[in-house]
Image (spheres, grey):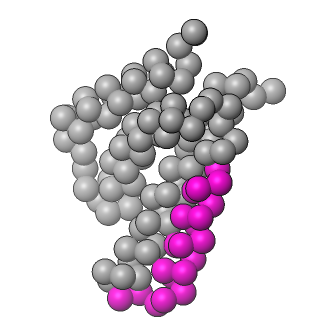
């Protein structure tokens, strides 16, 4: 059985894939002259990004604030895995601080 923290982290990851992946597809269409259907598909994936966070149990403001940190870390990972841009040590330190912030905001006992 998935814990509530595990479910929440999974939703953050899925939202990140939708936002970064959808944005990347639109980027490819608009900036790299890919076929317009790629941009349309990217827009649909971005729409899904708007839906996925609604399954989080926390309030809108807290979820989106925490997601901002997840987005930062996933963007660095995407840049490395897809575009081959290796994060430097300052990126890694900053990303770690962001993840620590998510842990406090979302999962610290209140």
Region in magenta:
33-52
24 above or below 74? below
Q: How many marks?
A: 0
In the rendered image, residue 44, in percent from the top left (x then y), is placed at: 60, 71
Residue that protrudes farthest toward the right in the picture: 1
Question: Which residue: 23% across, 39% down?
Answer: 91
In the rendered image, residue 86, in percent from the top left (x then y), is placed at: 25, 50
Question: Which residue: 38% across, 77% down?
Answer: 28
Question: Which residue: 37% across, 50% down?
Answer: 75
Instruction: Give the quarter of the figure containing the C terminus.
Output: top right
Instruction: Locate residue 92: give its quadrant.
Output: top left
Q: Name the foreground residue: 79 vs 5.
A: 5
In the rendered image, residue 68, in percent from the top left (x then y), is placed at: 41, 41
Residue that protrudes farthest toward the top in the picture: 110
Residue 77 shows up from this direction:
no
Q: Main secondary structure of the magenta part?
A: helix
Q: Name the foreground residue: 15 vs 87.
A: 15
Q: Is residue 50 left or right of residue 36?
A: right
Instruction: Locate residue 11: give its quadrant.
Output: top right
Q: Is residue 42 magenta?
A: yes
Q: Is residue 49 left or right of residue 77?
A: right
Residue 14 shows up from this direction:
yes
Question: Which residue: 37% across, 74% down?
Answer: 27
Instruction: Give the quarter of the figure containing the N terminus.
Output: top right
1 above or below 21? above
Q: Is residue 36 left or right of residue 69?
A: right
């Amino acid at each position: 059985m998935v814990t509530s923290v595990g479910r929440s982290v999974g939703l953050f990851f899925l939202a990140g894939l939708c936002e970064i992946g959808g944005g990347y597809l639109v980027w490819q269409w608009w900036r790299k002259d890919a076929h317009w259907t790629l941009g349309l598909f990217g827009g649909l994936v971005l729409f899904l990004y708007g839906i996925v966070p609604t399954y989080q149990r926390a309030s809108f403001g807290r979820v989106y604030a925490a997601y901002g940190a997840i987005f930062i870390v996933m963007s660095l990972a995407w840049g490395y895995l897809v575009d081959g841009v290796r994060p430097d040590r300052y990126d890694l330190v900053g990303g770690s601080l962001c993840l620590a912030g998510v842990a406090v905001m979302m999962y610290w006992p209140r």
